[in-house]
Amino acid sequence: MSIKIPDNAPDNIELTRSLYLKDEVELMIMNSLLCKKSINEILFWVAEFYYSGYCVELWDILWRCYYDFYAFTNPKLEYTLLKKHCAWNKTRKRKINNVSKSKSIGYIIDFIKTLRICSSTPDIFIFRLQVEKCHSTTKLTKYKGRKPTILSKYDNKYKHFIHSIHKNDKTNIMYYLNNYDPDELYLPMITYFETDKNIQLNKQHSLMIWNKLMYSKKHVLLGIYKMMFQIETNVNSHKIIIKHNEENIAYMQGLRHYKGVPHKFLKTMRHFNINKNIGCFALSRFQLDNLNTAIWYHWEYYAFNNPIWNERFRIYNGVINPNTKEIDFKNETYLEKFYEKYGYEPDEQSQDVHDKAYIPIQKQSISKWLNTVFGMNSSHYINNDNAVNSIIVENILGSTRWKKIEI
């Protein structure tokens, strides 16, 4: 069912079904995966996002994690992971029953468990943010002198682009990524690496992935550029998928429903804490003067954009009031019935339950997060570039919506 969100609804701060901040749950999926936390901790954040109504958007997060942090050293997993997404999409289109639900989350768990054992690196992540930083400032550098003979085989339209790749001119590449259609650049780039750099590629296989994967092609293309200059010995050759087990399925399904009294929901369903290390990102909480006051007394307003909560408000004839930052119900009867079922009372919870979602987080540099996740030698990735520091904060959560997958 399509849910229409009013134009005056809050668009920067959004709560999940357990009243976590949505952007922080997104980051916890990424952070717990990169830090190789327990499978249950990773699945908890995935379930919180998935069962909040973002089942399609979840795949955007998973692919962004793969291309930002795993593709550089695990490029051969790309097609195998794509098959999991395609299988999930097929199952989702069929009649929903317990079997199809189990299969659907099984494909997601396979994707996650596979990445969890893989090595990760921020190379593509940092380059992506540098590309974003240079979106409006980068200018093309023209080359003087004799042109490489390899350019003769390319269309005039792409000769300078190929010349820039040949010189590994990152500034020019950034310009092309920001100003040209990725579909135009894909084949010339692949042809160059395959024929002129003698990198063994399955061109047909790569083209099939390019056409089927309806993810941000700009992100994929910049990832290809970075991967092609990777040292072969640093690339993992395995394509093994780590399969889910019944315990994984049971854990995620156990997070789907709650049958207790409403005021104990948060105590029961919040299993893990938000990590303080995500303070380097542009968290929505930083827009609020007082997070506690906002959530305790206006949680319904900030939950309104969430698909699950929006549907609940619709059922009980609740509409958003942007002036009071509250939900107005048609009458007292609807109001009472809503809170009889969904009166979670965040202001009445214990400090432990409260801290799982709203523990104080201080702003910090991206270097600290990189060092925590990737080791003490990772500071060289940003080269003390303050501009990159700031742009990373702003762009990590940039979400490219999925359209559909052609099976």
Image (cartoon, rainbow, N blue to C red):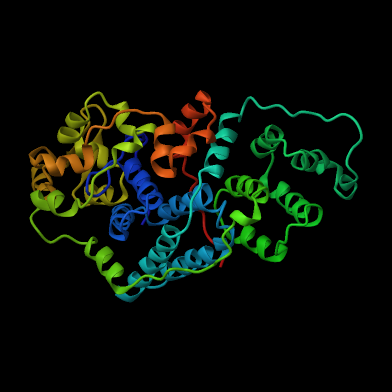
User: Is there any visible trace of residue 236 in the rendered image?
Assistant: yes
Q: Is residue 286 above or below residue 197?
A: above
| Residue toward you, 346 or 72 | 72
Residue 353 drawn at (x, y percent): 14, 44
- Locate residue 41, reporting x and y percent: 28, 55
- Image point (37%, 69%), residue name: 106
Point 36% across, 57% down: residue: 1
- Left or right: where does residue 344 sit relative to residue 242? left
In the rendered view, would you say 344 is above or below 281? below
Residue 70: image location, x then y, percent: 51, 53
Q: Position of residue 142 (x, y in %)?
A: 81, 29
Quarter-of-image position of residue 259: bottom left
How many numbered marks does the figure carry? 0
Q: Is residue 374 left or right of residue 99?
A: right
Tell me: residue 397, above or below residue 72: above
Examine the image and state in which quarter residue 9 appears.
top left
